[in-house]
Image: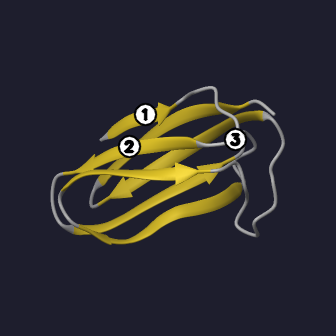
Amino acid sequence: SLGGAEPNPFNPRTSITYEVPHDGRARLRVFDLRGQLVTTLIDEVVEAGSHSVAWTGRDGGGREVPSGVYLYRLEAGQDVVHGRMMLVR
């Protein structure tokens, strides 16, 4: 499950909290509103429990992305959950 992004809106950094019920692979990715992948924050095996990861408004190549609404998607086992956040530069 997702705890959400705090702060939201944010500049220059937000923390996304999430919880996974079982040990296993988790993937947390950020997309723009067109559905294009911006960056992958987590793609690894994680332990069951609560976790937090920071996003600094940069794409996978380290470049700053523009202000706007971004979607994040957590995939953990069979579970897929979504959230949205707003970057204000």
Question: Of the numbered discs in the image, which one, if any, rests on residue 12?
Answer: 3
Number of other residues with Cα within 10 Å of mark 2, as a class: few under 14, some 14 to 19, many 20 or more: some
The quarter in which the N terminus is drawn is top left
Question: N-terminal of the two: label 1 or label 3?
Answer: 1
Which residue is drawn at the image coordinates 45% and 53% (left, top)?
Answer: 53
Q: Nearer the viewer, residue 73 or 16?
A: 16
Tell me whether the residue at label 2 lies in contact with that at label 3, contact meaning CB atoms closer than 8 angstroms.
no
Q: Residue at the top extreme?
A: 9
Visual colour scheme: secondary structure
Which residue is drawn at the image coordinates 56% and 33% (left, top)?
Answer: 84
What whole-number distance in Å separates the C-alpha atoms at marks 1 and 3?
Answer: 16 Å
Q: Is residue 19 above or below residue 45?
A: above
SS assignment at label 3: loop
Q: Tally the marks.
A: 3
Question: Mark 2 is on which residue type?
Answer: Thr
> x and y percent of residue 28 in the render?
47, 57
Q: Residue at the bottom extreme?
A: 45
Residue depth check, mark 2 versus mark 3: number of the one nearer the observer: 3
Which residue is drawn at the image coordinates 59% and 50% (left, top)?
Answer: 55
Which residue is drawn at the image coordinates 46% and 43% (left, top)?
Answer: 16
Number of other residues with Cα within 10 Å of mark 1, as a class: few under 14, some 14 to 19, many 20 or more: some
Tell me whether the residue at label 1 lies in contact with that at label 2, contact meaning CB atoms closer than 8 angstroms.
yes
> x and y percent of residue 76 in the render?
31, 58
Name the side, left or right, on which 15 lies relative to 30. left
Determine which residue is flagged by label 2. Answer: 17
Question: Mark 1 is on which residue type?
Answer: Gly
Question: Of the numbered discs in the image, which one, if any, rests on residue 4?
Answer: 1
Question: N-terminal of the two: label 2 or label 3?
Answer: 3
Number of other residues with Cα within 10 Å of mark 3, as a class: few under 14, some 14 to 19, many 20 or more: some
SS assignment at label 2: strand
Question: Mark 3 is on which residue type?
Answer: Pro
